[in-house]
Image: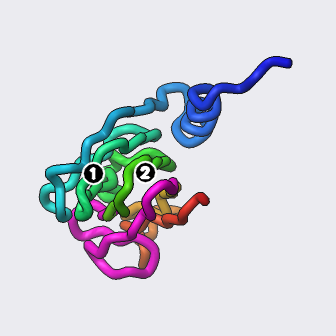
């Protein structure tokens, strides 16, 4: 019986988030990052973190500058929780501007872009610079 590899599953998931140009970044080291200013800047739809200190931090792409794709997958294969920050001035869930979201050790999270500065029909949205983030057990 044929088997499905983890690589194949990752690629299918990442492709669903970002389309044909979606990228998977592996071997991310969050060992020197400990806050929003020094956090590892996420640039790919798929992100596999395999090294981190207890205060390891990642920073999502900016929704406001339109550098963010529709969604981002973060896999935390470290022994530490990771701090996931939005870009400067943006928010995750209802945590407030610049607040971090914790990704538990050994778990993954999915972040979905929730808005842009211009909402439906060009009208500004109240929550335009937001990400919705949830853990995947």
Q: Position of residue 101 (x, y in %)?
A: 38, 70
Q: Which residues are magenta?
A: 84-108
Name the quadrant of the C terminus.
Answer: bottom right
Residue 4 badge = none
Q: Secondary structure at mark 2?
A: strand
Q: Name the one closer to the observer, 118 or 38.
A: 38
Q: CB atoms at circles 1 and 2 under 8 Å apart? A: yes
- Answer few, some or many: residues within 10 Å of disc 1's Cα (few below 14, many 20 plus, some between 14 and 19): many
Number of callouts:
2
Q: Position of residue 80 (x, y in %)?
A: 35, 59
Q: Earlier in the sequence, mark 1 or mark 2?
A: 1
Q: Secondary structure at mark 1?
A: strand
Name the quadrant of the N terminus.
Answer: top right
Q: Name the one closer to the observer, 120 or 112.
A: 112
Residue 52 badge = 1
Instruction: Write the residue at 28% across / 77% down.
Output: 97
Quadrant in the rendering for residue 136: bottom right
Instruction: Write the residue at 43% across / 59% down.
Output: 105
Q: Confirm whether residue 20 shows in the render.
A: yes
Secondary structure that dominates the magenta span: loop
Instruction: Write the residue at 39% across / 68% down.
Output: 102
In the picture, measured across the screen, residue 53 lies left or right of residue 68, that is: left
Residue 76 badge = 2
Question: Magenta stretch containing residue 60, yes or no?
Answer: no
Between the residue at mark 1 and the residue at mark 2, the CA separation in whole angstroms equals 9 Å
């Amino acid at each position: 019986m044929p088997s499905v590899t983890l690589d194949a599953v990752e690629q299918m998931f990442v492709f669903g988030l970002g389309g044909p140009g979606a990228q998977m970044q592996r071997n991310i080291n969050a060992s020197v990052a400990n806050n929003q200013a020094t956090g590892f800047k996420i640039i790919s739809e798929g992100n596999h973190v395999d090294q981190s200190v207890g205060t390891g931090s990642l920073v999502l792409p900016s929704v406001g500058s339109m550098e963010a794709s529709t969604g981002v997958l973060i896999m935390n294969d470290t022994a530490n929780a990771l701090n996931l920050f939005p870009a400067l001035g943006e928010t995750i869930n209802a945590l407030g501007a610049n607040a971090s979201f914790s990704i538990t050790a050994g778990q993954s999270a999915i972040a979905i872009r929730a808005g842009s500065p211009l909402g439906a029909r060009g009208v500004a949205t109240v929550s335009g610079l937001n990400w919705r983030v949830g853990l995947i057990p």
